[in-house]
Image (tube, rainbow, N blue to C red):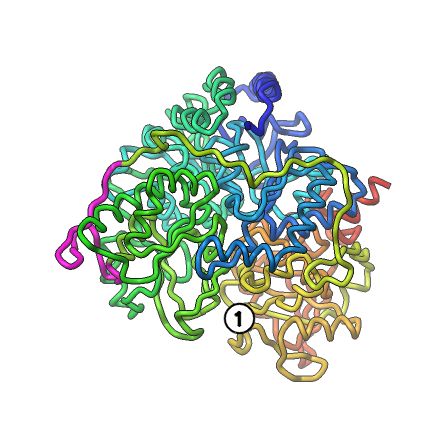
Amino acid sequence: MPFLNPDQIQEFYLDYIKKLQVVKEKLHRPLTYAEKILFTHFAKAEFTVQRSKSSIPLQVDRVAMQDATAQMAILQFMLTGKRSVAVPTTVHCDHLITAKVGATKDLEEANIQNKEVYQFLKSSANKYGLGFWKPGSGIIHQVILENYAVPGQLMIGTDSHTPNAGGLGMVAIGAGGAEAMDAMAGLSWTVTMPKLIGIQLKGTLNGWTSPKDVILKVAEILTVKGGTGCIIEYFGEGARTISATGKATITNMGAEVGATTSLFPYDQHTAAYLQATQRDFVAKAADSVKEELQADPEVEQNPLRFFDDVIIIDLDQLEPQIVGPHTPDLSRSLSALKDDVHKNHWPVQLSAALIGSCTNSSYEDMSRAAAVARKAAAQGLKAKVPFMVTPGSQQIFATMKRDGLLDVFEKIGGVVLANACGPCIGQWNRQDVPKGVRNSIITSYNRNFKKRNDNNAETHAFISSPEIVTAFALAGRLDFNPILDTIDGVKLEISAVDQLPSQGFVFDLSGYEEPTGRGEVIVDQHSERLALLQPFAPWKEKDFSELWLLVKAKGKCTTDHISPAGKWLEYRGHLDRISDNMFSGAVNAFSDQIGEGKNLLTGTEEGFSSIARAYQKNDKGWIAVGDVNYGEGSSREHAAMEPRYLGCRAVLAKSFARIAETNLKKQGILPLWFNVESDYDKILEADIIDIDSDAKVNELVYVTLTHADGAVEVIQTKHTFSAEQLEWFKYGSALNWLRERSS
């Protein structure tokens, strides 16, 4: 059952070529592939833009949402008054399933525990015309890759790993729920024109080296903020040797360097994957315009002329990579890991090994890991630590089962988890290691911040490819090198596998429900997990005077620090309840305490959310201050909605992650960048703060600090608001602005 309409696909490509001809006539220069997709999706035919400066309105082809973020996105969409979504949209139930004992029981428990949330999502999807994928059907990004991805199209998704679809040649961008709401309501979606980073791949992957190692190397080069405001475009003969799902692994983890998105050009591997997943008509149509589903030839011939930065990676020389702990850009080659482990006194004995996640759960990924496991099992080896396997979708699970891959993993002691995110996002009911106990785990996931996987700050999480993780599960130690070392006298081996199943995929669409466009949305008014929203009140001029400082965060302040996931996922549809976790992971710059600060009303130390509620009750507005790359990590807009709900006026930081900054703008909060980064040090715990809220495009915003001793300092801040975004702020939120326009 193809989910795409052949006639619409043919029409899309005809329109794509027609628009591209207009663009080329106006610009008179060769184009990168990313530019081709962006320019053909411009809502206005104005192509003279400046990278990193111009705001570009884009027409979106598709919206995808996972269940944790879809709740708030749909609740906001309901306030627009629209009767149905204006663009194809799907909801995927993958985030709320907790891993504990195994797929069957965990899924049964999730359906009971999350019944009212699933009912809400199902009923709202049915009413407003969204495709609905039930719990257990798969991880959003794998399901999108298998069913909906179309080369040359533009998609936004309410998850930061939406760029996974860039492996099939889409511009697929992670966004907040309010941004998804705009697209669902038929509005153009606006983003700052990204800079372009070109990554030229040479040679061919070999041996234990895999596509995962490419992006881990990129993370080492660019760091977690080096891709911010950029699209990463891969090209070169090496790119043409990597499978479609391997490309998806690479583009997926572009989120870890802050990239707006990443993509590969269309090639024979893209076509093969489309054909294998019942989209022959897409491959045929794409083949007819394939020259325009890649950069123009001049780009590859002279990349420095067209990209803002160019990185060259030789796949022939690339070694397997291991990153971590605590950040995805702390990388080293496999051969250097042993020395790093001992030098830094990291726990050598592994406590768990986990493969899967949206980054590495394709058939090829699982086949390579199974090849290691199969040869080890034949020699009598078993995993020395708990070994967990997460298939990416029901289609992958069913195909693995038919081809015996599940049996192979189980023979070495593996436990197969539900087709869901699970431990990758903290949905892991871990019982074997008490909180506070130092331990090491290794995964094939994408993020490894403290407390990310198991809510234990002392868990040292390392990331590598599924086959390397499988080898480490068998060894049970971090100082193991499968290329050189043996386990009980047995040398592990890696072998070539099929990129696609030789017998074809087992197609299982039992988890999908087509919408009828009828019915009512089900929300229990007494629910503690769901609550209908009320629009935020518009700002008044006095709202930015005599503000207090709630939190000054030290070091990393990711979305996991601002609004942790884990146990809090169950409240993603209830703004008041989930606001109790606000800044609960932030490190207080004045005391080094986590999640706590000084209540200036009482002088006592309390949780940040409790203090914010007290300030709000006393009509005291407040600000938050962050360090570098504030809001790094996931797309969760709760990290903006919770502060707005509890009275935040502005967030000042040295720099912002793209999605986090946009989410703050959408909710009516001022994200302000220190014009001089060292001004961060001038803000003191008891300051009274006044902000000139009459912000104008490309002008500085002045912030006045009155210190406890009466001294006054004025600091300069800058912002990235466009004229339209300033309208959001003036109305109190983008939703308020949209409602006003629609009335």
> Is residue 478 shown in magenta?
yes
In this rendering, the answer to whether 362 lies above or below 641 is above
The amino acid marked with disc number 1 is: Val
Residue 378 in sight from this viewpoint:
yes
Q: Give the residue drawn at x 41%, y 44%.
A: 361
Of all residues, the one furthest to the left in this rendering is 489
Q: Is residue 198 left or right of residue 523?
A: left
In front of the other: 665 or 529: 529
Using the rendered view, name the quadrant where residue 82 is placed.
top right
Quarter of the figure with the C terminus? top right
Residue 310 in sight from this viewpoint:
no
In front of the other: 719 or 202: 202
In front of the other: 383 or 239: 383
Range of magenta residues? 475-496
**So how many labels did they put on this image?**
1
Q: Give the residue drawn at x 31%, y 64%.
A: 350
Residue 255 in percent (x, y) is at: 48, 47
Q: Is residue 681 left or right of residue 70?
A: left
In this rendering, the answer to whether 550 lies above or below 662 is below
> Is residue 719 shown in magenta?
no
Residue 292 in percent (x, y) is at: 49, 20
Helix, strand, or loop for circle 1?
A: loop
In this rendering, the answer to whether 542 lies above or below 405 is below
Residue 129 in percent (x, y) is at: 70, 36
Badge 1 local density, few (<14 within 10 Å), some, or many (20+)? many
Main SS of the magenta part reads loop
Residue 735 in percent (x, y) is at: 76, 48
Residue identifier under label 1: 587
Q: Is residue 96 left or right of residue 385?
A: right
Using the rendered view, name the quadrant where residue 148 is placed.
top right
Q: Give the residue drawn at x 57%, y 66%.
A: 680
Of all residues, the one furthest to the bottom in this rendering is 603
